[in-house]
Amino acid sequence: MKRYVFFPVFILIFSAGIFSTKIFSDLLPEGKKRIQYSFELTNIDSYPGYTFIAYPVNNSNGAPYITANILSQNKPVQLACKFGVPVIYAVKNEDFNKAEFDSVCMIDESSPRSEKLNEFILNGKFIPSLKIICDSYANRDAKYNFVNEQFGIESINNDTMIIKSQKTLYKDNNNNTIDAKDSKSGFRDDVVSPQEQVGSYLIIVIPILALIAIITVLVLRKMKK
């Protein structure tokens, strides 16, 4: 009898695992929609003696593709807001080997590419600054679908670079700016935090797991009769 009881229990547990994984991967947080986030440095041209790099950068919503980006004036960098938080670095032009950088970024396999980029940054004369923290969800009824955060370089010396967020633009599907907030406006209440994302998922998953547990108990009782 024990041999026959084990099989349905295994099937139920296995199915629960698949189902809950599907929920976590496919469903948006309750009441939220996915948006696209990008950032840019607005005054790169004021520092012609430096090259600016963001690393690690992932702009894939599927399997992560970690790389690094050379930042350019008026060219936003899009982020998927997961699998890595990029840091903005500065390096003097004479200390930057662009040919080697391009070669490393072209490595096909993700893990070796990431390792080589780490070595390239750590062994170079790169000056780190702030991390780019972003979210890819907003309230479902929000009128915007794109967020562009603009940063400005305030100063660079031999080992320190100060960069601050200046303005955040909210745009619709037609690239119309429907709202703009400067860096003194405080937190954006309509962008969900990671804690809220987890909470929304748990609200869905916990009742489903409880139902599976009840079904398992009923099946076991029936088979014992």
Image (tube, rainbow, N blue to C red):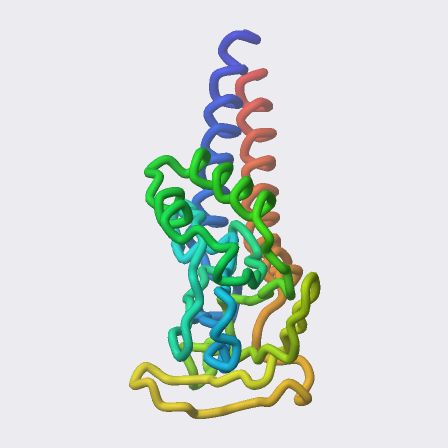
Image: 171 above or below 113? below
Residue at the front extreme?
A: 94
- In the rendered image, the vertical position of residue 16 relative to residue 80, given as above or below: above
Viewer-side residue, 171 vs 184 = 184
Q: Residue at x 66, y 89 (%)?
A: 185
Residue 189 seen in the figure: no
Which sits in the foreground, 51 or 82? 51
Residue 82 horizontal/vertical position (percent): 51, 55
**Quarter placement of the N terminus:** top right
Q: Residue at x 44, y 34 (%)?
A: 112
How far across and how far down the image is residue 205, in percent?
A: 56, 49
Q: Residue at x 57, y 22 (%)?
A: 220
Is residue 22 positioned above or below 29 on the image?
Answer: above
- Give residue 113's position: percent from left, percent from top: 43, 39
| Identity of the residue furthest to the left in this view | 174
* 12 or 80, nearer to the observer: 80
**What's the residue at 45%, 71% (across, down)?**
38
Can see residue 15?
Answer: yes
Q: Which quadrant: the C terminus?
A: top right
